[in-house]
Image (tube, rainbow, N blue to C red):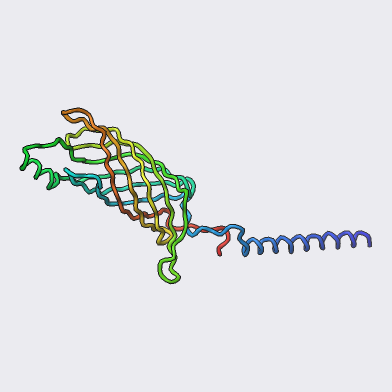
Amino acid sequence: MRLFRTFSAIILLILISTHAFAQTEEFEKNIRIIQQKSFIKKGRFEALPSFGISLNETLTSHFNTGIAVNYYFTDQISFGLSYQKYFGEMSDLATEVGDDFQIYPEKRLINQYIGGHAAYTPIYGKLLVVDNFIVYYDLYVTAGAGATKTAKRTQHFTGNIGIGMKFFVFKFLALNVEFNDYIYNENFQSGDEIMNNFTLSFGLGVFVPPGFDYKYQK
């Protein structure tokens, strides 16, 4: 009789524990202490084709196309490589100055840039665009280094700082706008000069793998 009571008590404890565990799992599935983010970048690669223009030019005019590949170690921190091909020409102002004053300031057209960079995302949020259509975004800062090749086929060590925003469209796709300052030293015949190439670029970020899952779906 005593053995039967002991066995019954053990079975009852097991049933109570199983019920409590099931209730805990159900609680975790339905209660959120912190709201889940709509887009996860951690552990994913991003291929980012882009095009851009140089903003601070008077005697030259450049636009560029490029590609960047980024890897996100966390949602806030990423590292990547980028390549940009520039297409430039002397501006109308340069021609007018030469024709009117017979002065031909020395300028070098940019050929390409290649380098690496790191980015940090301190801010993210959402915008209500139309009615109930919500667009999620984040704002990031970036810094890096590389090499700029100019028209005379000389490579110049280049520092790069910038700021950008991503607007998330789907789980695998984001629109990107970025402002950068590429800083390098150009060797003119009249002497060395620090150059600032301010660029504004627009891109389309494609993330791999294309999706992500939470442990518990909302």
Residue 74 spot, x, y in % from top left: 49, 47
Task: Tell me what residue is drawn at x 44 percent, y 45 percent.
Answer: 120
- Toward the right, the furthest residue is 1
Residue 27 spot, x, y in % from top left: 66, 63
Q: Is residue 155 left or right of residue 23?
A: left
In the rendered view, would you say 111 is above or below 22? above
Q: Is residue 92 left or right of residue 178?
A: left
Q: Nearer the viewer, residue 71 or 184?
A: 184
User: Which part of the image, by quadrant, shows the C terminus?
Assistant: bottom right
In the rendered view, would you say 57 is above or below 207? above
Task: Tell me what residue is drawn at x 61 percent, y 58 percent.
Answer: 33
Residue 212 spot, x, y in % from top left: 48, 57
In the rendered view, would you say 192 is above or below 205? above
- Counting every numbered tag in the picture gives 0
- Toward the bottom, the furthest residue is 131
User: Which part of the image, by quadrant, shows the N terminus?
Assistant: bottom right
Residue 117 spot, x, y in % from top left: 38, 41
Q: Nearer the viewer, residue 194 or 41?
A: 194
